[in-house]
Every structure is written in structure tokens, then in C-alpha cells.
Image: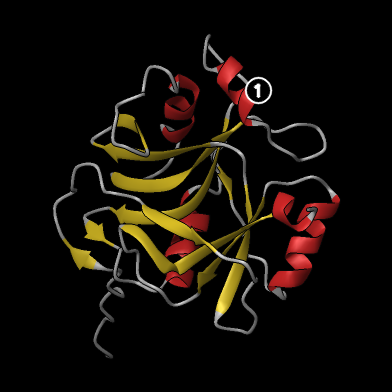
Amino acid sequence: MAPRKKPTAIGVKAPIPGFIEPALSTSIDKVPAGERWIHEIKFDGYRVQVHLANEAIKVFTRRGHDWTKRFKKIADDAWHISAGSAIIDGDVVVPAADGTTDFSVLQNELKGKSTKIVMVAFDLLYLNGFDLRKLPLIERKAHLRKLIANSAIQLSDSLETEGVDVLKHACSIGLEGIVSKVRDSRYNSGRGNDWIKKHARSEKR
């Protein structure tokens, strides 16, 4: 009888950390080209980090403030994720019927108990006892896709096409812009060159 295969390790076994300083994108003048890069739509939203541990859920702002009560709907949506522990990076947005997002609309929504806000997730930093930050981005996103598949949290899809075409599309329908990311990059806190952004409005000038 053949020996049982050990499950593939996904990251580094580690206790769940506290708030992780987010990775930030750097503004650039020209969208990068080539297979090294993947491209995502840039949303006009509020950066958040969702922590799930032992059925307790917290939603942190970009600077690490606990806004779980203000983002109650996001916490409720995350409760339906099937994981013992997880840390998800993403944006909270209020999507319009045409797919665009407006930060001023989001700010108004946060004054009350919003039912319109949605989390668009784009990275997974920790899952079930394993730190995933050293995994290639494309692998982290694959795990993220499976994790949130049956929840109200949406995935920020990676577009496998040339960045200039993605930007043209974003401009044509009034989106915020695009974020280009090195497909095999680690998750590095702070501002760096593995994630770069191009605003659609700068193309219209």
C-alpha cells in the first residue's frame, strides 16, 4: 500500500498575529506590461483588514483602528466563512448599479447601520494556523477564492490581459483606476513596487 500523502503546506505555521500593516501601492505614470503582472480594478472604497479567530470577528481600518461596530455588516458577512482563523485584506465599497463606487456615498452610509456596504477582498494573509504572506500572490488569491466562495464577501478578480487594456476599460465606464501586482510577489507591509496603481482620472487629463 502506498504511503498516505501529507497535505501540501500552505505557508508557515504560526499563531495568528494582531493587526498587520497593510501593503500599499505606489502611483506610476505607465501601466506595466508582460506576464509578470496581474491587474485588478481599483475601487473607491475604505481599506479594511478582517480578522476571524475562534468565531470572533474584528474589522480594522488601514491604520489599525477597530471599526467592527461601524462595519457590522462586513463582520456579519465574514462570520459565514468556513475557517477557524483567517486574515483578509480588502476594500469596503458601496457598489452602484453600473459597477462604479463612490467614496462620498460610502461615507454617508457609515453614518448609520448600512445594509449596502460590501467587502471586495483581494488578499489572504493568514488561514487556519498558517501565515501565508511568503506565498506567491497568485497562490494566496487561489486560497482566498475558495475561502469566500459561499459568503457575501466578493473577490477582486485578477484580469489576465494587458494592463493598458484594463485601464482603458476602467476609464470608459468611470471606474477609479487599476492596481497592477507582481503575480509571484510576497505580501510586504508598507509601500513598495510590487503593487503599483494608475488612476483612471489621470488618463483623462
Horizontal side of 122 relative to 185 (left or right) equals: right
- How busy is the neighbourhood of tag 1: few (under 14 within 10 Å), some, or many (20 plus)? some
**Residue 179 in the image, given as x and y percentages of width and height:** 58, 60
Q: Position of residue 135 (x, y in %)?
A: 34, 72
Q: Is residue 153 left or right of residue 75?
A: right
Q: Residue furthest bottom?
A: 2
Q: How many marks?
A: 1
Q: Is residue 148 left or right of residue 8?
A: right
The location of residue 105, given as percent across then percent down, is: 65, 22
20 over 187 or under it: above or below: above
Give the residue drawn at x 64%, y 29%: 94
Secondary structure of the residue carrying tag 1 is helix
Colouring of the image: secondary structure
| Residue at figure coordinates x 28%, y 49% from the top left | 21
Q: Residue furthest right?
A: 172
Q: Between 108 and 16, which is closer to the camera in this rendering?
A: 108
In the picture of the structure, the residue carrying the numbered disc 1 is 105
Residue at image coords 14%, 52%: 15
Q: Quadrant of the N terminus?
A: bottom left
Give the residue type at disc 1: Val
